[in-house]
Image (cartoon, rainbow, N blue to C red):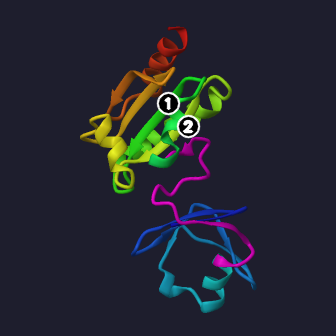
Amino acid sequence: MAISSSSSSICFNPTRFHTARHISSPSRLFPVTSFSPRSLRFSDRRSLLSSSASRLCLSPLCVRDSRAAEVTQRSWEDSVLKSETPVLVEFYTSWCGPCRMVHRIIDEIAGDYAGKLNCYLLNADNDLPVAEEYEIKAVPVVLLFKNGEKRESIMGTMPKEFYISAIERVLNS
């Protein structure tokens, strides 16, 4: 779980909070690098979740809002197979550490190729029939589609340039 405010971003770990900046409290602004939730006064804990925190992110990926949209089994056909624009789909699971690294790369690519490529995320645990249809045995996997057909597949965590070269091959085909 992450709490983001204008002055800091905190990722929740069951044992500790971590931040690199300052945390606002009603009475003061104090610098911290690491602290225990138990060491905070109730008013301090409440201020972390109050209006000063702009959003509460319950995503297991613990990242900012993604430029890549979620796709599900229900929306798969319309979003991916019937798309006139080439499509990139990242198959991930919430418990997969390498998927988080790939997700950040796909998020950048979604911004770089906006209008030329539709980028989606599919949780393989939640939409198992789609993952089975494309024989996804491990995650992360990135599939590229054009005209409803799978054109490229990339398994595992790769550098951004690797994904870009696969995208360029699909766009130019």
Q: Please check the rendered image and state whether residue 69 is part of the magenta-colored stretch, yes or no.
A: yes
| Residue contact at pointers 2 and 1, CB within 8 angstroms | yes
For label 2, the residue is 78
Expressed as whole percent of the image width and height from the top left, the position of residue 100 reads 43, 47
Location of residue 94 with respect to 130 vertically, above or below:
below
Location of residue 64 with respect to 139 vertically, above or below:
below
Is residue 139 at least partly visible in the picture? no
Say whether residue 115 is left or right of residue 140.
right
Q: Residues within 10 Å of mark 2 (few under 14, many from 20)?
A: few
Give the overall secondary structure of the magenta segment: loop
Q: Residue furthest left?
A: 137
Residue closest to the eye, 7 or 125: 125
Q: Amino acid at mark 1?
A: Leu
Expressed as whole percent of the image width and height from the top left, the position of residue 142 reads 40, 32
Say whether residue 68 is left or right of residue 61.
right
Residue drawn at the location 43% of the way across and 69% of the way down: 13
Q: Of helix, strand and loop, which one carries label 2?
A: helix
Q: Residues within 10 Å of mark 1 (few under 14, many from 20)?
A: some
Q: Of helix, strand and loop, which one carries label 1?
A: helix
For label 1, the residue is 81
Location of residue 144 with respect to 40 vertically, above or below:
above
Residue drawn at the location 51% of the way across and 33% of the way down: 80
Q: Amino acid at mark 2?
A: Asp
Is residue 128 at least partly visible in the picture? yes
Expressed as whole percent of the image width and height from the top left, the position of residue 62 reads 50, 58
Location of residue 26 with respect to 132 vertically, above or below:
below
Mark 2–mark 1 Cα distance, whole angstroms, equals 6 Å
Residue range in magenta is 49-71
Q: Please check the rendered image and state whether residue 24 is part of the magenta-colored stretch, yes or no.
A: no
Residue drawn at the location 68% of the way across and 81% of the way down: 47
